[in-house]
Every structure is written in C-alpha cells, then in structure tokens.
Amino acid sequence: MSPEKWLGDCLDYGKTLVDSGAKGIRSGAESYLQGQPLSAALGESARTSLPFAIVGVGAGLLQLVAGQRRHRIPKTVAAVIAGAGVGFLVVFSWKTRELTGSMAHDALKNVGVARDARWLERHPITYA
C-alpha cells in the first residue's frame, strides 16, 4: 500500500470516528433532555452555580485580610477570580454530570460501532 493511500485511509477512518462520536453526543443529549432545549438545562445549572461562585469570591477576599501588605490588591484580585471560577465550575460540573455522562456514553457506543465495522472490514469472517 502506498503512503498516500494509507494516509487517505487513516484520514477517512478518523473522519468516520469523529462523525460517529458527534452523532453519539447529539443523541445522548437528546435522550437525556427529552425535548427540553439544551440552553434551558445549562442556564438552570448556571443559575444554581452562581451562589457558590459568590462563596468563592468571599474565600478570595480572605486574601485581603490575611495577606501581607505588599502586593495585597493584585493577589486579592487573583484570589477572588480564582475562587469565583472554582466555585462556579465545580458546582456547574456537578449539576450537569448526568447530561455529560449520557452524551459520553452514547458517543463511546457509536465510536465502538464504527471501530467494529472497520475491524470487520479489514478482517472479514468467512464461514465454511
């Protein structure tokens, strides 16, 4: 097999895997959401995550009290941003874990089907 043909086959197979994974992600989201729009589900998770971001801001403000006098404001700003980000992301990830799990499950299932089809194509089963 020439290198050009081999590279073309690898690229086609990669495209097939990406397409099947994307279809799995869409089907996993649709099966979990059951007709509800994705933006509504993510918006609700974001709204419930905001109070925890505020708790993270409060934790970051502790740097202002406990920090040294030198470079206190820049360190406090960095701690506030980091605290808000961590607080929001942790709770948002927890709230959307079932949606993410459904999407990942269906994506992996579809990629497995594509891999099996490729294997059977390369290793045909001949019955006697």
Image (tube, rainbow, N blue to C red):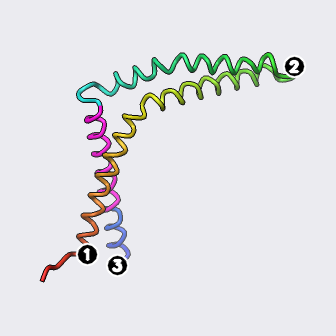
Task: Name the N-terminal-most of marks 2 and 3.
Answer: 3
Density class for disc 1 (Cα within 10 Å; few <14, some 14-19, many ≥20) is: few
Q: Position of residue 3 (x, y in %)?
A: 38, 75
Task: Please state the extent of the stretch shown in magenta in the rendering.
Answer: 13-32
Mark toward the viewer: 2 or 1 = 1
The amino acid type, in three-letter code, at marker 3 is Ser
Magenta residue check for 42: no
Quadrant in the picture for residue 46: top left
User: Is disc 1 placed on a helix, strand or loop?
Assistant: loop
Q: Split into 4 quadrants, where in the image is the N terminus? A: bottom left
Above or below for 31 versus 52 = below
Residue 14 on the magenta span = yes
Image point (51%, 27%), residue name? 91
Q: Residues within 10 Å of mark 2 (few under 14, many from 20)?
A: few
Residue 126: x and y in percent read 16, 79
Q: Quadrant of residue 29?
A: top left
Instruction: Look at label 1 and name its amino acid.
Output: His
Which image quarter is the C terminus in? bottom left
Residue at x 78%, y 17% (from the top left corner): 64
Q: Is residue 21 left or right of residue 46?
A: left
Q: Residue at x 29, y 45 (%)?
A: 24
Q: Which residue is mark 3?
A: 2
Q: CA distance from mark 2 to mark 1?
A: 70 Å
Can you tell which of label 3 and label 1 is closer to the viewer?
Answer: 1
Q: Residue at x 74, y 21 (%)?
A: 76
128 lies left or right of 111: left
Three-letter code for the amino acid on which mark 2 is drawn: Arg
Residue receiving disc 1: 123
Q: Residue 69's mark?
A: 2
Mark 3 vs mark 1, CA separation in Å? 20 Å
Secondary structure of residue under mark 3: loop
Figure check: 20 above or below 6: above
